[in-house]
Image: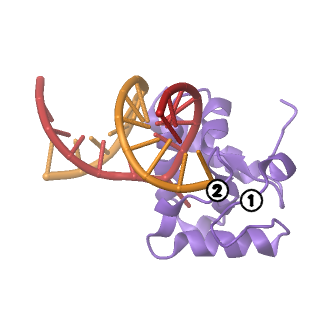
Chain colours: A purple, B red, C orange
Amino acid sequence: MSATDLSERVRALVARIPRGRVATYGQLAQMAGRPRAARQVGQVLRALDESKRLPWHRVVNSSGRVSRAASRGGGDRLQELRLRAEGVAVDESGRLDLERHLWRPRS
DNA sequence: CCACTGACGAGTG
DNA sequence: GCACTCGCCAGTG
């Protein structure tokens, strides 16, 4: 599988995350068939074109927190605002309840 | 080829 | 929970 395949798979998966739910980088990597490519998932999201309207804000890390590394340009703040706007409680340090909001697709 | 760098994750103290 | 280390792997210089 090539890097572009991973990129396309990840974008397709992100597009399927329902409102009010979140997925983790590692989860998406696994679903894309690359269980250890969580960092690459991050690279894919980093390169997203905002005009594509993908819900990238629904992707958080495995500890249930908004990644602070997304703060380039205040991206982490934007992510928190968008999550709260769709009903996900995110505290001031970027934490949220994974048990309650994790996306659990059937397949 | 090597060194360094991450929107990460698991393990340890 | 926090700080740190280490493994991972594609991208960059």
Chain of the residue where label 1 is placed in the rendered structure: A
Name the spot of residue A35 as percent of width and height, x first: 58, 27
Q: Relative to residue C12, is residue A2 drawn left or right?
A: right
Q: Quadrant of the C terminus of chain A?
A: top right
* Residue in the foreground of this view, choosing between C6 and A103: C6
- Indicate the amino acid at tag 1: Leu
Query: Is A77 situated above or below A97?
Result: below
Chain of the residue where label 2 is placed in the rendered structure: A
Q: Pointer 2: what residue?
A: A65
Q: Image quadrant of residue A57?
A: bottom right
Q: What residue is shown at x 57% (from left), y 43% (from top)? A: A8
* Mark 2 secondary-structure assignment: loop
| Inter-mark Cα distance, 1 to 2 | 6 Å
Query: Is B10 situated above or below A8?
Result: above
Name the spot of residue A85 as percent of width and height, x first: 79, 75
For mark 1, does the 10 Å Cα neighbourhood hold few (<14), some (14 to 19), or many (20 or more) residues? many
Q: Relative to residue A6, is residue C1 drawn left or right?
A: right
Instruction: Assess whether mark 2 and mark 1 are in contact (beta carbons under 8 angstroms).
Output: yes
Query: Is A57 situated above or below A35?
Result: below
Residue A96 marker: 1
* Residue in the foreground of this view, choosing between A66 and A30: A66
**Mark 1 or 2 closer to N-term?**
2
* Residue in the foreground of this view, choosing between A11 and A17: A17
Name the spot of residue A53 as percent of width and height, x first: 66, 66
Q: What residue is shown at x 66% (from left), y 53% (from top)? A: A59
Q: What residue is shown at x 65% (from left), y 47% (from top)? A: A63
